[in-house]
Image (cartoon, rainbow, N blue to C red):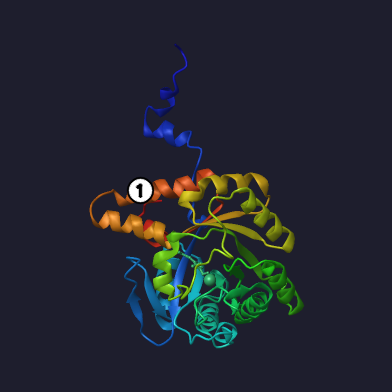
Amino acid sequence: MNIRPRRLRKNPIIRELIAETRLSKDMFVYPHFVVGGKGVKEPINAMPGIHHFSVDELLKDVEIGMKLGINKVLLFGVGEEKSEDASTSYDSNSIVSLAVSALKEKFVNDLYIITDVCVCAYTTHGHCGIVHDSYVDNDKSVEVLAKMALAHAKAGADMIAPSDMMDGRVGAIRQTLDDSGFENTAIMSYTIKFASAYYGPFREAADSAPEFGDRKSYQMDFRNKREAMKEAELDELEGADILMIKPALAYLDVISELRQQTNLPVACYNVSGEYSMVKAAAEKGLIDEQKIVMENMYAFSRAGADIIITYHIREILEKGWL
Ligand code: PBG
Ligand code: ZN
């Protein structure tokens, strides 16, 4: 037998030479949870290592992150006054808008700011849209989402990331941004977002759990991959610049399929539940955290993700795991 694949595994030098998948810090986006007040840096119980930051503390944390090489952040607003119509979500003084302007003032164009656009943290019932007769009304929700996106763009956001899964929201947001002179504000759509139990820890962090029912009438059924490709096709036609899949770990097949079906950049979101499971197992000494985290990151990239959104990136760079 003269075909011996092991020849190319002999030592680290040859293994590095033939590695098919490589990671770069430029592929990663780091999420942040922003709250009101001053001097707040509160650990989030469900997500070890992640905090709620008030804007002043956020500026410090982002500065540290930038020194490590994190120059792309995804912002979530937490703790705003909640209402049926989610009106605080598009207030020009919303926590997110204030955070965006403060970050832009301090870091100008050295930092790329992405904002999550969804109303679940702003509605009394915790659904991702406006509720009418116990049903999330699509078109009314889209109107509010477009206003929220515009508010973030006005504050200086570089990219808008709608995470609600209403039909037609990408097109409506694109139109609203264009009509208001924000044709250069990009859209990364949470295109294929499955109704998933992996968002559990996040809902504690964002105080955004639905009070009745679940999100299955708008988020996707995780059994469906063809329907996922349909969602992606629609978002592409509506003008999305980047297509995101979420969660990531249990959906590598979907990442792989989408990478083959679109010419747009594909992002994956390594969500809170995926993060917290690794952290919890590591705290118990059940796994080698560094090895597990990096195996997961390579898996996302190998599956076809061009962009990885993960709570792990801070620690990965701090500890030099990359
Ligand atoms: C809000 C939103 C969620 C996440 C991102 N944006 C939660 C949800 O849809 O319930 C999840 C992020 C994570 O779990 O890390 N629509
Ligand atoms: Zn939501």
- What is the x, y in percent for residue 178? 74, 74
- What is the x, y in percent for residue 256? 57, 45
Q: Residue furthest right?
A: 179
Give the secondary structure at mark 1. Answer: helix
- What is the x, y in percent for residue 94? 53, 85
235 or 127: nearer the viewer: 127
Amino acid marked by disc 1: Ile
86 or 109: nearer the viewer: 86
- What is the x, y in percent for residue 240? 68, 62
Q: Residue at x 39, y 49 (%)?
A: 294
55 or 42: nearer the viewer: 42
Check disc 1 and report the residue beneath it.
292
Q: Look at the image and tell me whether residue 288 can be seen.
A: yes
Q: Is residue 233 left or right of residue 109?
A: right
**Quarter assignment of residue 79:** bottom left
Q: Residue at x 39, y 58 (%)?
A: 275
Q: Look at the image and tell me whether residue 271 can be seen.
A: no
